[in-house]
Every structure is written in structure tokens, then in C-alpha cells.
Image (cartoon, helix red, strand yellow):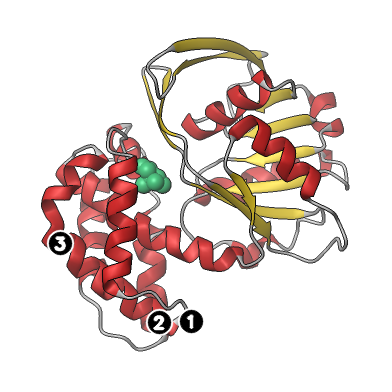
Amino acid sequence: MKITILGCGALGRLLAYFLTKNGNNVQGWLKEDKKNNICINITHTNNTKDNIILPTNNILHLNNSNLLIVTLKIGSIIYSLKQIINFINKNCIILLIYNGLGIEKKLSFIKQPLLIGITYHAVYKEKEIIYHNYKGLTAIGKINNTVKDINYNILIKKLNLALTNVIWCENIHVFKLKKLAINCVINPLTTIYNCKNGELLKYNKSIFSICKELSYILIHMNIFINTKDLVILVTNVINNTKNNISSMLQDIKNNKYSEIDYINGYIIKCARLYNLYIYENIKLFNMIKYKELNVI
Ligand code: PAF
């Protein structure tokens, strides 16, 4: 497959690495820094190291890509996609993989087949090195019906060969909301306590209170998950990704705005819509907003 990856942060580089190693023709697309290539240095889950050179920003490669994977932060997806959408052929499948929710209604300018992915790979970037901490599941599904009757089986098979644990999901929205709930707990807490995911296990009382509030809100969104099951889900992710630095903590450490508006912020908006009294998510939201005051 000819693939372009828009967004060469930790996740984008991880996917580029595995897809290249699996024989695909992959390039990265950098928004500002128009280099011809970048070096991907990776430390694997078993601590072995490797590196590849990834070509970047070749317009012909973009024109001819069969797959465009977008791994940008949710807040910059719309603007960045609009910059390049006219260079993408109409049959190219666009796969968006992002944390959070809230931009879905603004994606109607995309006329290509559009997929959304949720991944449990845990990865962070430090000093240009990508640390892959957990090989998690990636669920992919459809969010628009612009192009009907496409058989995505081949795509899923190819992605599965490269990334392992890739599944097709008919009801991707449920998957997305569950991942959102997990991010609502892990991301702000790791940022507030400035710790790796695994260290959160000692804050089990906070985890319980946040999950209780989240399951109460999720029921109003037709996602029926009780507090106990949500705590188990969150705890499993914490255990699996114990050595990871959450994406929100990475942002704050790198002096960037976080995705809080699209994570706990999204949940707060939904709670308002349903007239629900909430406390925990607002507290976390305000604490992260306070941290963001230092972002230059
Ligand atoms: O945002 C993140 O960092 C990831 O979604 C997760 C699963 C919490 C692992 O760090």
C-alpha cells in the first residue's frame, strides 16, 4: 500500500515504522518543517532498538496514496486536513486516529471514504526517541457513508499484519466513548501528579469517584457500563501501559496545549446537555487549564 501519515508525533512515527517494516510504501507529512525525510528511532516493548529513515512531504506520493492516516492531535485535524485535501485522490481511504471527541460533525468536507480508529498502543517520544510501551488493540470503523459498499477487509488484514491486533468495529462510537472515559481518568490524573500511568494505582479513591461520575454520564449517552466495570477497564489500561507517559502529560511537559477540551471538556458539555450535576470532571478540567496557563 502507498501510505501517507499526517502527524509525525509519537503515534504517527510508531505506525510509520511498523507499516514500513511490513513492506508498505510509507511517507510522513510534516505540517511546518518541510524536510525530505526524518529518522525514526524506536525502542521496542522488549527494549531492543532500531531506526529507519522515513521520506516526507512528497506531493506525488500524497496524490497517489491509497491510505492517509491522520495521527494529529484532535485540535489540529480539521485545519491541517483542509490544507491538503485537494491533493488527495477521491479513492484514498482516510483513517483518523485521535484521542477525544467533538470534531465529528465538522468532517463533512471530506468526500473520501472516512474511517476512525481507536488505539490502545502506548507510546511516547522523548529526545527524538520513540518508546513503544504496549502493543494494544486498534479498532477501526466507519463514521460516514459518503462511499458505500467498500470492502475494508483487505485494509484491516494489511494493517493487522503490520500493527497486530487490528479489528473492524461496526459500532465504533461505543468504542470511542469507552476510550474517552479511560482518557478522562488517566490523562488528567497523570498530568496533575506528573507521573507515569502505572503510578496512578495508588490514587484508587480518585479513580473510583471519577469512574462513578463517568458511568452516570455515559448511561445518558446510551453506553451502559457500571462504575465497577469502568474501574476494571481503567485499571487494566493503567497496568498494561504502566511505563507510559500519557499524551496529556507529554503535551504539558513539551509546553503544548493539551487535549482537555476534547476529553473531560467534551464530557462536561454532554453533562450540561443532559442537565446533570457533575463535579469530578470539572475539577480535573480546571486543574489542567491551570497547568496550561504556563504554556507559552
Ligand atoms: O493518551 C494516552 O496516553 C493513551 O490513550 C493511553 C491509553 C492513556 C496510554 O497512555
The residue that appears at 47% across and 35% down in the rendered structure is 135
Q: Write down which quadrant ligand 1 falls in.
A: top left
Residue 269 higher or lower than 61, as above or below: below
Identify the residue position indicated by label 2 in the image: 219
Residue 34 higher or lower than 85, as above or below: above
Q: Can you say which quadrant of the picture contains the C terminus? A: top left
Identify the residue position indicated by label 3 in the image: 206
Residue 269 position within the rendered picture, expressed as x and y whole percent measured from the top left: 40, 74
Residue 168 position within the rendered picture, expressed as x and y whole percent measured from the top left: 66, 54
Q: Residues within 10 Å of mark 3 (few under 14, many from 20)?
A: some
Frontmost residue, 186 versus 22:
22
Find out if the beta carbon at label 1 lies less than 8 Å from the nearest ligand 1 atom. Answer: no
Tell whether 110 sits left or right of 262.
Answer: right
Residue type at mark 2: give it.
Answer: Ile
Q: Report if residue 94 is visible in the image.
A: yes
The image quadrant of residue 163 is top right
